[in-house]
Image (cartoon, grey):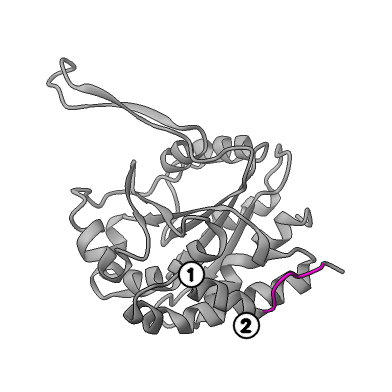
Amino acid sequence: MVQIKKNDEELAQQMMNKISLSKDKANLEKHVISLSKCVVNLSKKNGVDLGSTRAKVVVVLDYSGSMSLLYDNGTIQNTINKLVPLGLTFDDNGSIDVFLFQSDYKKISDLNLSNYENYIQNVVKTSGYSMGGTNYAPVLKAIIQGNSYKVGGFLGFGGHSVTDEPIVENDIPTFILFITDGENSDQSDSDNIIRKSSEMNVFIQFIGIGHEKFKYLIQLDDMTGRKRDNTGFSKMEDLNNASDDELYNNILEQFSKWLNGLQ
């Protein structure tokens, strides 16, 4: 049986110690307590001390047109508030890398204790990024292997090159939480980058929201040509009304199994 270094109360206190402002303590304590209980329960269930795991946490948010209402009605902001404790648990600096995606992608400011309260209004909606289609591969490639592209200029002249360094590295696991409400239009390219990622220290947890059937994400369980199964998929139709327990278990169940080599 795995030796768990901290029980749920100790883990919750460790997270709360990282929070300095009283308003943040009040806002986040309920989520911290729920996450701590989930982490300890999954640690016992899957034989890995999840609470002592260090990992880079990356959140990827669908920014296709069909997501518009969820950004406007507070659903994504409410979810963001529940994700902040993940950074406090797994990442030493308490921050979370965030990417928006549609047909392409955009990396935006990290999510952390200083900006989470109005993250959608102040960061996402001021990013200059427009809603579009649904491709998974470009943002996954940027996170996993990096990307270079040109900005500015006119008719191919001028401008300058920008390089996004890969987030995934060998020394520490990268945990990607990928939230989407639709099927992708680039399944072959997505297959290729997911197969490549299976050789690396990265786990991708897809969360499908809404009423889409998500045939592509479901069939990932049977994808051949991977060194290791490093993806998970959970469907959560109503993200706004999901309890903390439901959300955290859907996020972390398969990640904990992957850490222990159970998938």
Rendered residue at 61%/66% (across/down): 252
Is 2 placed left or right of 72 in the picture?
A: right
Q: Which mark is residue 9?
A: 2
* Amino acid at pointer 1: Pro
**Could you tell me residue 40's position as x and y percent?**
69, 75
Q: Which mark is residue 232?
A: none
Q: Secondary structure at mark 1?
A: helix
Can you see residue 33? yes
Rendered residue at 18%/55% (across/down): 126
Magenta span dominant secondary structure: loop
Is 15 placed left or right of 210 in the picture?
A: right
**Could you tell me residue 29's position as x and y percent?**
46, 82
Q: Is 4 contained in the magenta span?
A: yes
- Quadrant of the rendered image containing residue 103: top left
Depth check: give the residue in front, 110 or 59: 110
Rendered residue at 43%/33% (across/down): 165
* Amino acid at pointer 2: Glu
Q: Nearer the viewer, mark 1 or mark 2?
A: 2
Vertical placement of residue 147 versus 231, above or below = above
- Give, as a single range, the part of the protein colored magenta: 3-7
Q: CA distance from mark 1 to mark 2?
A: 14 Å
Q: Secondary structure at mark 2?
A: helix
Rendered residue at 42%/42% (across/down): 139
Depth check: give the residue in front, 192 or 98: 98
> Disc 1 or 2, which lies upstream in sequence?
2
**Could you tell me residue 188's position as x and y percent?**
53, 37
Vertical placement of residue 22 versus 151, above or below = below
Mark 1 sits on what residue?
85
User: Number of labelled discs?
Assistant: 2
Q: Quadrant of the N terminus?
A: bottom right
In the rendered structure, are the residues bearing label 1 and label 2 in contact, judged by CB atoms less than 8 Å apart?
A: no
